[in-house]
Image (spheres, rainbow, N blue to C red):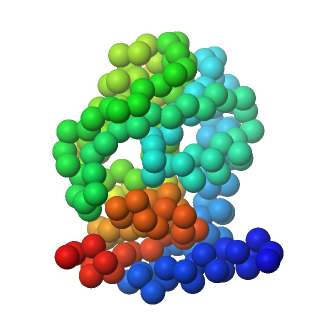
Amino acid sequence: MSSRQSVDAAMALREEDMERILWTDVEISARVSELAEEMSEVLRDSEAAVVFVGIATGSFMFLADVARRITIPIAVDLVRVESYGLGTESGGAPRLTTDLKIDVRGKHVVLVEDIVDTGNTLFWLIAHMKSKGASSVSVCTFLDKPSRRKVIPEPFGEGRFYRGFECPDNFVVGYGMDFAELYRNLPYIGVLKKEKYQL
């Protein structure tokens, strides 16, 4: 089976669970390439070393794809922050369960997130990176859902805010994002049918 056939099979696997598909794998790939090109150009002149920090688990596909397209030297690390549990609504105060292994003191951190909705997690993580001595922090989110924003996660220092797509106020899955740990492996972003998560 070719890689294209494998993608088509994965797309069909759970497509019946979707209300609609927002972005296909082809659209996602094109946008990730654009983001990587933009960040590579901006960060090329950074005097500080650059560390991409993925926020597990939702960002793993996006982090891997964007890191492969970055054309400057970077280090990569992961943190794990819990705020959703098994539900569809952010639980509020984030809880760090896995911290960095890399020392980010004096470095430029790029926080890589799957989706920003309330902003609570990123607001907390930016402060956490500051406390670890990062010289600046950028945010790179695959999806941005400004309609749900409660706090503004402002980058600091020479940091910038990068986003892939603006997301409507729907519960979305795929490309690393889940409901109860399912659907992460879908290569597209889809709106999950309500009957699939409302019991």
Q: Residue at x 43, y 13 (%)?
A: 133
User: Would you say 77 lies left or right of 123 here?
Assistant: right
| Image coordinates for residue 65, horizontal then vertical, percent | 65, 51
Up-down: is 69 above or below 88? above
Q: Residue furthest right?
A: 2
| Image coordinates for residue 130, horizontal then vertical, percent | 38, 19
Q: Residue at x 54, y 20 (%)?
A: 102
Up-down: is 116 above or below 135? below
| Image coordinates for residue 11, horizontal then vertical, percent | 58, 78
Q: Residue at x 32, y 32 (%)?
A: 96
State which quarter of the image contains the C terminus: bottom left
User: Would you say 111 lies left or right of 87 here?
Assistant: right
In front of the other: 11 or 75: 11
**Observer able to see residue 146:** no
In this rendering, the count of numbered labels is: 0
Up-down: is 157 above or below 117? above
